[in-house]
Image (cartoon, rainbow, N blue to C red):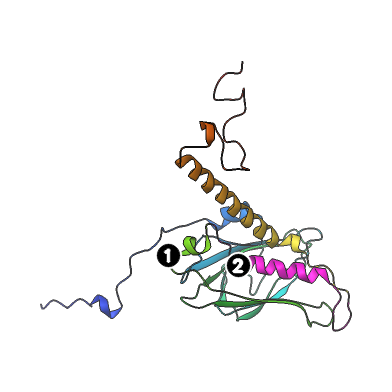
Amino acid sequence: MAQQPKPAASEGRAIAPPDREPMKTNVFEFMRATGGKLLPLFPYLDAGSIVPAAALAWGKADGRYGSFIHTNTQDEVVIVFASDGTPGRSGTGMTRAGNKTHPVGPFFDDPDNTERFGLFTITQRQPEEGPAKESVWLLCEECKKEVTRIDFSVTPARRGKQESELGPYAPFETIPKTGQAFLRFNENLKCPHCGHQNQPFPEERWRLVDYADQTATVRRARAVLDATRDVFEKGGPPGGGPGGPPGAAPSGPPQGQGGGHAR
């Protein structure tokens, strides 16, 4: 029997070798130890990256989540890993691709019910080139017209160049920008259209501002670590004793605690 010719790689059937370390995580384990409502599972945010973000919602006394409108030029795919059995769009195992413009929240009709919960992921693929454009806006509770809106666009780093272009631990910009919209809404709760005095948006239930603050702090901490490393690679601080760059805490143990005997 004549041997069938193999398709040439140039026909587009060859799989490119990986350009990064494969990663995995357990979404249940991940979300039990995190503080925010929407968190990327992996650090890859550069061009073409698949970016899954996990979210966990639960009912509690005075547990209102509020809601907002989100527009994204990138498709978002939602997977419900588990829920309390609420039928319809949020049932366990449901998968859906949402509209480019879609509501987010309030998750439950009865957020004070402690039996309510939902664990899900929202995944988008970063554009290969050019920006991803997004909008977040909050509406008046009474007349349903726009009160606050933030438009933003993010051009991902070039493939494989994320740390060199954005620095270590770059934020997933959707999260801090959405947190900014929450804070801006709360600065002036009176609707400019109908005069209704809205309730403050319950940002503490989302903690997106915490994500922004923690990311900024971690990036500063990494900069101090790198500066300290550079000092020691050049022979250490003056005098050869423990320490780091100016302003850094001493790196050695306090007198009388470890590393020797108190006298």
Q: Nearer the viewer, residue 90 or 159?
A: 159
For disc 1, the marked residue is 160
- Quick one: label 1 or label 2, which is nearer the N terminus? 1
Classify 110 as above or below 96: above
Amino acid type at mark 2: Glu
Give the quarter of the figure containing the N terminus.
Answer: bottom left
Residue 84 lies, in percent from the top left, at 67, 63
Provide the secondary structure element on which disc 2 rests.
loop
Q: Nearer the viewer, residue 33 or 127?
A: 127
Q: Residue at x 67, y 57 (%)?
A: 213
Q: Residue at x 84, y 69 (%)?
A: 199
Residue 177 on the magenta segment: yes
Q: Residue at x 62, y 39 (%)?
A: 249
For disc 2, the marked residue is 173
Check the image and name the residue furthest to the left.
1
For the magenta stretch, what is the residue range?
169-196
Residue 221 lies, in percent from the top left, at 59, 49
Can the viewer see residue 106? Answer: no
Can the viewer see residue 185? Answer: yes
